[in-house]
Amino acid sequence: MKRLALITIAILCVTATYAQKSKKTSTAVVVAPKTVTEITSYALGVNMLSGLKQNAEQYGIKLDWKWVIKGLKEASEDKSQFNETQLRDAFAMLDSLVKDNNKEKAKVQKDFLTENAKKEGIVVTPSGLQYKVIRMGNGAKPTADDKVKVQYEGKTIDGKVFDSSYQRGEPITFPLNNVIKGWVEGIQLMPVGSKFVFYIPSELAYGEQGAGGGAIEPNSTLIFEVELLEINPKEDEHADEHGKTDQPRIRF
């Protein structure tokens, strides 16, 4: 998380803790922005708060939105309730919250992989990648330098689907060496015509960064069902030429 986001969340979290609850109520009148200044200012506010909400959810930080608005308003008027010492305390509080949340999430992910490895049919490679063969094909196996054409579905360990070529109704073609490590290793184990399920530890997936605008949280173990259709297929309209951050492609 960028320092600006950390600072913003810290200020708002501590504001929610220390500030007194307002007893005033009012009836809001919706007014649409009209001038260039109003429109750009509104857009900036929407963008900033959307990013704040995404970061807070991603890192397990609970926000009270009425205090978010109050904090922003007071900061814009140079009426912040916090001095520098209180801000440092806020950063320490935030660091503690994030670390505690990360430890708990890491334990859940580790426990899942430990138990999954005990199940019948699960193979564990030296890297920690786990996989299960659903159907073994009889074609050639790709190398990391090949392009591959696949159908796949990706989900988190709680069963939430975050991407699926099946749902889009079309396979995807991409250079194998441009994808996450778990895919690079796993797909090279598959003869064409195979269907595997991969259980990919976070260090072989998106690690501490996460992906997909928060849909894949930091340190997430991912489950991919993958069918290998072709190696080095002819270029077609579905070929993907993007880089590593979009491979496998994550659409929302």
Image: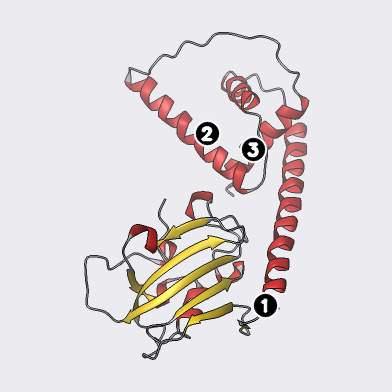
Q: Could you say which is closer to the camera, residue 146 or residue 36?
A: 146
Q: CA distance from mark 1 to mark 2?
A: 43 Å
Sequence-first tag of 3 and 1: 3
Q: Position of residue 153 (x, y in %)?
A: 45, 65
Q: CA distance from mark 3 to mark 2?
A: 10 Å
Badge 1 local density, few (<14 within 10 Å), some, or many (20+)?
few
Q: Are marks 3 and 2 in contact (CB under 8 Å)?
A: no
Q: Position of residue 140 (x, y in %)?
A: 37, 91
Q: Could you say which is closer to the camera, residue 228 or residue 134?
A: 134
* Residue 113 seen from this side: yes
For label 1, the residue is 119
Above or below for 90 versus 98 = above
- Left or right? Give the position of 97 relative to 211: right
- Left or right? Give the position of 2 relative to 144: right
Q: Quadrant of residue 55?
A: top right
Which amino acid type is marked by label 3? Ile
Q: Which mark is residue 49?
A: 2
Q: Secondary structure at mark 1?
A: loop
For label 3, the residue is 9
Which amino acid type is marked by label 1? Lys
Q: Quadrant of residue 164?
A: bottom left
Q: Secondary structure at mark 3?
A: helix
Sequence-first tag of 1 and 2: 2
Q: Quadrant of residue 71?
A: top right
Sequence-first tag of 3 and 2: 3
Q: Are marks 1 and 2 in contact (CB under 8 Å)?
A: no
Q: Position of residue 108 (x, y in %)?
A: 72, 61
* Residue 83 seen from this side: no
